[in-house]
Amino acid sequence: MNRGYFKRVAAGQGYSRREFLRRGRSAAAASVLAGAAIPAVHAAEDNTILLALVGCGGRGSGAVANALEAPGGPVKLVAMADLFESRLVSSYKTLSRQYGDRIDVPPERRFVGFDSYRKAID
């Protein structure tokens, strides 16, 4: 900060309106030019929301269907887990038929058993 400014203010000699406007314009121009000097290089972002379905019954499958139909961005199912293989297979077939390419759950990301939820969220 300019120490001379504080001395002038203390002595009752602050900036005039013209001086204030001149300095304000200079500061505004400098900030605009500084923004233009920054290169606009950004990596492409992938804002896809990735879902893991734990519990492939009616409530869990319905929740995934609601998430896939919700507005606000791309959503993809990437893992499934259930205690029973038959329920997982049934849910996978139904969701794949209904949502196609938004269901990306290869066999290695389908988990069955008591600890399947841990594998699905890893």
Image: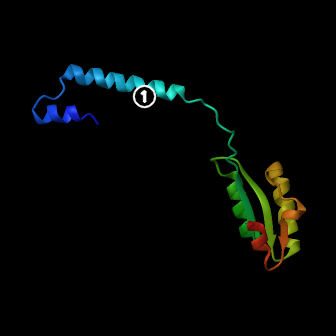
Q: Which residue lies furthest to the bottom in this view?
A: 114
Identify the residue shown where x is 72% and y is 59%: 51
Q: Percent from the top left, x then y, of residue 16?
A: 17, 23
In the depicted structure, whether residue 84 falls above or below residue 109: below
Identify the residue shown where x is 82% and y is 49%: 101
Residue behind mark 1: 31
Residue 104 relative to residue 25: left or right: right
Q: Percent from the top left, x then y, of residue 111?
A: 84, 70
Report crowding for label 1: few under 14, some 14 to 19, many 20 or more residues within 10 A (C-alpha).
Answer: few
Identify the residue shown where x is 31% and y is 25%: 24
* Quarter of the figure with the C terminus: bottom right
Element marked by disc 1: helix
* Residue type highlighted by circle 1: Ser
In which quarter of the view is residue 39 placed? top right
Identify the residue shown where x is 26% and y is 22%: 21
Depth order, front residue of 73/1? 1
In which quarter of the view is residue 2 placed? top left
In the depicted structure, whether residue 98 falls above or below residue 17: below
Q: Percent from the top left, x then y, of residue 27?
A: 36, 26
* Quarter of the figure with the N terminus: top left
Depth order, front residue of 60/104? 104
In the depicted structure, whether residue 85 falls above or below residue 69: below
Q: Percent from the top left, x then y, of residue 36?
A: 52, 25
**Snapshot colouring:** rainbow
Q: Which residue lies furthest to the left in this view?
A: 11
- Count of marks overlaid on the render: 1
